[in-house]
Amino acid sequence: MKEHMLDFDQEELQILNDFERGEFESIRDFQREKKELEGAARSTLQKDKRINIRISSRDLERLQMQAAREGVPYQTYIASSLHKLVSGRLKEIR
C-alpha cells in the first residue's frame, strides 16, 4: 500500500486492507441489488411526516435570512439543517 497517496481514516484503511487481501466478492445480480438499494435510499429520504414547532421570532428571522443567502425556501433550509444534524454532518462551531 502506498502511504503517500492520501490520508485515510481507520474505517477507510480497514476497507482498503480488506480489498487488497481479496476479501470482497462481486455482487451476482448487481442491477437488482442496485435497484433495491436505490429504493431503500429513496424511502429513507422521503418527506412523509409533518411537524409543527414553536420557535422564537428571532430564530425564525435568522433562519429565513440564512435560507435567503443559500437561495432556498426557509422550510427546505430548516429540513436540510435538521437532516444534517441527525445524520452527524452538522458540526457545532465554538
Image: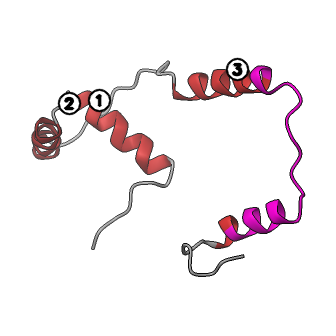
What colouring style does the render use? secondary structure
Q: What mark, if any, has residue 72 been given in the picture?
A: 2
Please tell me whether mark 1 or mark 2 is closer to you in this view: 2
Q: Which residue is found at the position 63% from the left and 81% from the top?
A: 3
Residue at mark 1: 76
Residue found 20% across the figure and 27% down from its top: 73
- In-front residue for pair 19/77: 19
The amino acid beneath tag 1 is Thr
Q: Mark 3 points at which residue?
A: 35
Front residue of 53/29: it is: 29
How crowded is the residue under tag 3: few (<14 C-alpha within 10 Å), some, or many (20+)? few
What is the quadrant of the N terminus in the image? Answer: bottom right
Q: Are marks 2 and 3 in contact (CB under 8 Å)?
A: no
Give the quarter of the figure containing the C terminus: bottom left
Q: How crowded is mark 1: few (under 14 residues within 10 Å), some or many (20 or more)?
A: few
Q: Which mark is residue 57?
A: none
Could you say where residue 19 lies in the image, as x and y percent from the top left?
81, 60
Residue numbers of the magenta segment: 13-32
Q: In this view, does 43 lie to the left or right of 47?
A: right
Which type of secondary structure does the marked residue at label 1 adopt? helix
Q: Which residue type does callout 2 highlight?
A: Val
Q: How many labels does the image show?
A: 3
Taking depth in this image into account, of 36 and 56 the one nearest to the observer is 36
Labels 3 & 1 near each other (Cβ < 8 A): no
Q: Residues within 10 Å of mark 2 (few under 14, many from 20)?
A: few
Q: Is residue 7 magenta?
A: no
Q: Where is residue 69 in the image (x, y as percent from the top left)?
A: 11, 41
Relative to 26, does residue 39 appear above or below in the rendering?
A: above
